Image (cartoon, grey):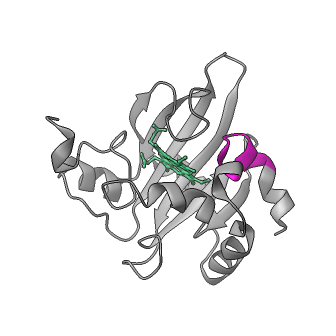
Amino acid sequence: MAVAACSPGLDGVGVSTAGGGGTGAAAVDAGAEAPPFDPQVRASLVPFGKGEETSGHAPGLYDFALFANEAARVTMAGGARSFPLGSVLGIEHQRRDGSGKGPSFFMEKRSASGDRFGGWRFVAVDTQGRVVDQGQLEACGHCHRDAPNDYVFPALTPVRPADAGAP
Ligand code: HEC
């Protein structure tokens, strides 16, 4: 997959500029080793919550809705700080000006911890439902590695770092 082909989806949420260089090659390598992400997975995810004005993906441009599969939902409900294999999280974006939806993003736990992003595969899906990029994407991981709960931000999980105050 050419890097150029990945850009439209990522540009839409402003992560390509934040990601720096060299993300395309890493994405292709990681994606080639694993079975490709199946966009049909979306149908198996349940809503987990909504938020206004993404702080991470094109800040201020989108409202967002969060989704999780059963493995991830149970993990979050139990307050665990790390997610089991097979966990899938999703986020969908709606433009705040009402002009339509933005891309969807997914995180899928593919290995216990054996890579630089804690075993997570990152996936970007365009507004047509097509996967535009997937793998150990630096463009995503460079932010998510700073998230407190196994690469997951507390916008989704009820788990918060000890110093973040009362839940
Ligand atoms: C600039 C930092 C940043 C980048 C880059 C980024 N994210 Fe996020 N992401 C966040 C933040 C912050 C949240 C929490 C929701 C919010 O406030 O936007 C989040 C939420 C998510 C969620 C819901 C789970 C959670 O952690 O809350 C998924 C799935 C996700 N991002 C996937 C991706 C993918 C895939 C990419 C790359 C295409 C990506 N993200 C790039 C910061 C980022």
Q: Quadrant of residue 104?
A: top right
**How many marks can you see?**
0
| Left or right: 75 as drawn, with respect to 116 | left
Residue sitting at 18 percent across and 51 percent down?
79
| Left or right: 104 as drawn, with respect to 141 | right
**Does the rendering let one see residue 37?**
no
| Left or right: 68 as drawn, with respect to 157 | right
Residue 125 spot, x, y in % from top left: 67, 50
Above or below, 128 against 87 in this view is: above
Above or below, 125 against 99 in this view is: below
Residue 24 within the magenta-colored segment of the rendering: no
Residue sitting at 70 percent across and 24 percent down?
100
Residue sitting at 74 percent across and 56 percent down?
132
Residue 34 spot, x, y in % from top left: 59, 79
Give the position of the N terminus as an image quadrant: bottom right
Front one among 148 and 18: 18
Give the position of the C terminus as an image quadrant: top left
Residue sitting at 61 percent across and 65 percent down?
137
Q: Main secondary structure of the magenta part?
A: helix
Q: Magenta stretch: give its range.
A: 8-16
Residue 138 spot, x, y in % from top left: 60, 65
The residue most toward the top is 97
**Does the rendering let one see residue 116?**
yes
| Left or right: 10 as drawn, with respect to 165 | right
Residue 9 within the magenta-colored segment of the rendering: yes
